[in-house]
Image (spheres, rainbow, N blue to C red):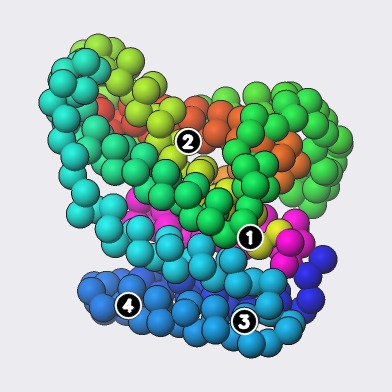
Amino acid sequence: MGSPAAIRVAWIALCLASSIPAIVFAELTGAVPPWLWVVQLVVVAAVLGASLLHRAARRLWRFAVVLIALLLLLQVAPLLHPVWMPLQALLGGSPFDARMQPEQTAKVATSVVMVGLLLLLGLKRRDFFLAVGSLKAPIKPAPLLGFPHRDPWYRFGLIWGFGIAFALFAVPYVMIRPSGEDLLVVVPALPSIVVYAAVNALNEEVTYRAPLLATLEPAVGSTQAMWQTAVFFGVAHYFGTPGGLMGAALAVFMGWILSKAMVETRGLFWPWFIHFLSDVAIFVFLALDLLT
């Protein structure tokens, strides 16, 4: 359990570095100012300085470095556009491949950078969950959230993994009502969907979840680290799919489940697996939009 001062500083830094300021600007003015990320960077750098100077927040210095790296990577990644036509052709060469290959290749690069940074910060591979983890570890009960029993993660992960993915498929299906012919158009792209979903889930777990949990947990404790990481992950989906306030709220809950999986199993498999199934459902409709 971290000190109250460290917990407060971590929450303030995380919220200011997250998509929350961008959401506020978007709601109030209709646009996100291009200079916002610079202000966020300065604020987090100030937190880093404070964490080095003040004893109560000193254990947050690695967390502050990771936040600075994330802010910079979020700016650099969109500038990378490595178009590899042979790789696109290998996976089918569809408009879906043309959209996903550059994006996912850039994400792989950011994942490699983040892993290198964590190693430079003195963390060992298992410190930032770069392992399969214990597939049979019991979950820590959370009765108020509907998890009263110490079920093994292989049961919990399968039920919630497929359950969340089904919900993410069913809701847009009911809203869009694609025809049978439309769905048949997506079938040839299914191998690409599976590959890109697997890569995307791994990249996002390695880049955004594991570094935050690994640097927050020693400073603020597991419970706070899981919720803080969930908020950072969830509010980013305000501008994503599903989007808006409801999409962000649902993503915070999913982010908590994924963080819980990572902390309690001490590895990547279950958070990656649950995330992967959800991405398959989301990417089906992305492919549907691009191919029809």
Tell me the number on the disc at residue 52.
3
Q: CA distance from mark 2 to mark 3?
A: 32 Å
Q: Position of residue 272 (x, y in %)?
A: 55, 33
Label 1 neighbour load within 10 Å: few <14, some 14-19, many 20+: many
Give the residue pinned by disc 1: 215
Check the picture and name the quadrant holding the N terminus.
bottom right
Label 3 neighbour load within 10 Å: few <14, some 14-19, many 20+: some
Q: CA distance from mark 2 to mark 1?
A: 19 Å
CB under 8 Å between discs 4 and 1: no
Residue appearing at x 32%, y 16% in the figure: 190
Q: Amino acid at mark 3?
A: Leu
The magenta stretch spans residue 37: no
Q: Looking at the picture, does residue 66 appear above or below residue 204?
A: below
Magenta segment range?
Answer: 218-246
Q: CA distance from mark 3 to mark 1?
A: 15 Å
Q: Amino acid at mark 4?
A: Val
CB under 8 Å between discs 3 and 1: no
Give the residue pinned by disc 2: 202
Residue appearing at x 72%, y 67% in the figure: 219
Q: Position of residue 105 (x, y in %)?
A: 29, 37
Q: Amino acid at mark 2?
A: Leu
Label 4 neighbour load within 10 Å: few <14, some 14-19, many 20+: few
The magenta stretch spans residue 226: yes
User: SS of the residue at dot 4?
Assistant: helix
Dividing the picture into quadrants, the one containing residue 230 is bottom right
CB under 8 Å between discs 2 and 4: no
Q: Earlier in the sequence, mark 2 or mark 4?
A: 4
